[in-house]
Amino acid sequence: MLQGLRNLAARWRRTARFAGACALAALALVLLRVWPHQALLAGQPWSHAVHASGGELLRLTLAADDQFRQPLRLGDMPAALPESVLLYEDRWYYWHPGVNPLALVRSAWSSATGTRRQGGSTITMQLARRLYRIDSRSVGGKLKQAAAALWIEARYGKREILEAYLNLAPYGGNVEGVGAASLVYFRKSAASLVLPEMLALAVIPQNPRQRLVGAGAPGALRAARARLWQRWQERHPDDRRWQADMQLALHTEGKANMPFLAPHLVDLLLHEQQQGQETQGEIDSSLDLRAQRVLERVIGDYLRSRAETGVVNASAMLVDTSTMQVRALVGSADYGNSAIAGQVNGTLGRRSPGSTLKPFIYGLALDQGLLHPKTVLRDTPSAFGAFTPENFDGRFVGPLAAEDALIRSRNVPAVAVAAKLSRPDLYDFLKQAGVAHMESREHYGLALVLGGGEVSMEELVQMYAMLANGGEWRPVTYRGVAAPGQQRRLLSEEASYITLDMLRRNPRPDTSAPGQPAIAWKTGTSWGFRDAWTAGVFGRYALAVWLGNFDGAGNPALVGVDMAAPLFMRIVDALRAERLDPGPVPRALPQDLRLVEVCAASGDLPDETCPRVVQSWFIAGKSPIKRNTLHRQVWIDKDKGTLACKQGPNTVAKTVEAWTSDVQQLMRQAGLPLRDTSACGGDGDSAPRILQPLRGVRHIVRAAHPEPILLVAQAAGDVRELFWFVDGALVGRAAPGETVAWKPAGPGHHTVRVADSNGHADTRDIDIDLVP
């Protein structure tokens, strides 16, 4: 009996030791699992896949080790993909510890007997071979592989191991993982694969050399997929609906013709990704591949049709104004052409915008109550300090409505309007619109109005999109999902609406008809004919096109209206022909907008003398309101056709326009003199107006070589001479429009006054600084 108790005690001790060993082993396994360690895929270099908004692959880059390897989380894969892999490769995956002894014995037996070779490696063993670069062709290598698999299983969960394997499985050559394989061979993401394609991917890693997907699936691939299909049907009898599809040829692609689309936009996104220190993942762009192809085709055809002009390069950007997503981008005419520096992205380059900034001058003036569309401006010879602008055609057209001055891109009226702007002026506007790398305000002066600064196409498109968005500025995005970005109001809804309405009246250069349906556009030509621009809004889009040379070489053919505007219109027409213009976002009419009748010749509220009235948009509480004083009634001798100073039995009444001296002089030079009423003394109700010196400008005079301050004024048509005074002292006399040169005695504040012989006067205060 004592011996029996001793045996029982020994058995308890052995059991306790065994239980302790098991507990220690379990604790060790738990510690291995919870002890901090890197993820299985940590440190792996990855490819970048860039997609269009419709999911089309634009480019798949090589990883740092020259492999196509696209990261894909297990939860983002269709469930049938990992299941089909396990069904073919490792049906007992979730039950073994990393090594399947039965599979190893079966594999060894088939190799020894010479029957059909069967693999004995589990999913974990295959992962271990790839992670640790193990040569498993020898017995020692196989043992090392098994040990590594057990080590992996002890430290990582089954789902993490399976995810790592599916990201590293061999798919022929330098293609690894189901993410890259689906993009390379099917040109779609793994999430978009259908069952026949997933079954094909499941069988390739077992023998990628023989089953490599190429042009038309080879026999080895078809046979292996058929075997897997039989197993799949046994497990999923409801999927027999795919039987007909399984009989069809498997349409696949290869690495030889990998897509390389929208290269400038893709380069930009990849650069952003690199700057953000993101080392992996897919990039969903905002690009509409159909619109991109339209822009590329139209630009290519257009440049070939204009080959005789020597213009060989162009850029364009198309933005959906409702989302500010870039839908198409052409950085150069030919990405692969080194002769034109084709890899340079012209949409980001800084160029002189020419007259494309003029709409924003008028928008600011509308908001500051300086004008409305029918306000009459003067296109006459003018000087603004040392700046004497001229029109592109070298001519002056006299009085014209503000909307006509904008449409016809007259320089002098635009500069005159810009000179009257208070804060914000054009410089402030461009700063608020995100225009980068601007010099000081003094560096540009009024030359900024005519393209004296530089902007990028991206910045210009954002400003035109701002008009379509009711004056709200937002930055563009190249991503499929627009991140919440900054926005700021630059113009009122009313000013934006009116500005676009004026631009829509711009006649097309190819038909001379208004830019309909609903095209608001403006051209620009830079100094020295280096850049030809057209930017505008149509439907839901803002579009800008540029033609020129990246090296800044000039070409007389680079005129905005002649070269860029036809290309702009061709792109618009092509997009509409392809039904890619969804139309504008419906917007209510701004609440403070009114249609008001004004006198056509003066732009003022009509009186009884106004012969013709037109309608103009007014912004309630802002637009300038004054009565018409341009017209006056005179008496004409019916027999002689000469002016009579009073009504008589042989006279007839006639309404004439009493323009100021500068307009009358321009008309006389053009051979179209206005009727001079000065013989009857005029009405004397028009005071002279100082044109120069400018209001609110500090004048800098060099002490060593002082230059005179130029004094210029206009007056009523009957005024022949003007008298100039500075601080009460007469400094000169001249006819209206002529210049008096005054040399200041020193720095300080001065009052300049001009008077006519009727006693009417205008006054302006100026400040003068003396510098060495």
Image (cartoon, grey):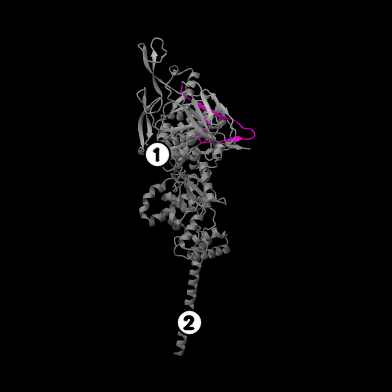
Residue under pointer 1: 493
Element assignment for label 1 = helix
Instruction: Give how far across and how far down residue 279 sits, in percent.
Output: 53, 52
The quarter of the rendered structure image containing the C terminus is top right
Nearer the observer, 217 or 664:
664
Look at the image and say whether residue 710 sits in the magenta stretch.
Answer: yes
Mark 1 or mark 2, which is nearer to you?
A: 1
Query: For the residue carrying disc 2, how many other residues have a C-alpha within 10 Å: few (<14), some (14-19), or many (20+)?
Result: few
Residue 123 circle label: none
Q: Earlier in the sequence, mark 1 or mark 2?
A: 2
Residue 13 circle label: 2
Contact (CB < 8 A) between labels 1 and 2? Answer: no
Give the answer, above or below, for where 324 lies relative to 507. Answer: below
Q: CA distance from mark 1 to mark 2?
A: 90 Å
Nearer the observer, 267 or 154:
267
Query: For the residue carrying disc 1, how many other residues have a C-alpha within 10 Å: few (<14), some (14-19), or many (20+)?
Result: many
Instruction: Give how far across and how far down residue 218 sits, in percent.
Output: 49, 47
The quarter of the rendered structure image containing the N terminus is bottom left
Instruction: Give how far across and how far down residue 678 sits, in percent.
Output: 45, 18
In the image, 362: left or right of 388? Answer: left
Give the answer, above or below, for where 721 lies relative to 93. Answer: above
User: Which quarter of the picture shows residue 596?
Assistant: top left
Q: Measuring 43% from the left and 20% from the top, which residue is drawn there?
A: 682
Give the answer, above or below, for where 517 lies relative to 487. Answer: above
Figure disc tally: 2
Look at the image and say whether residue 121 sits in the magenta stretch.
Answer: no
Magenta part of the protein: which range? Answer: 692-717
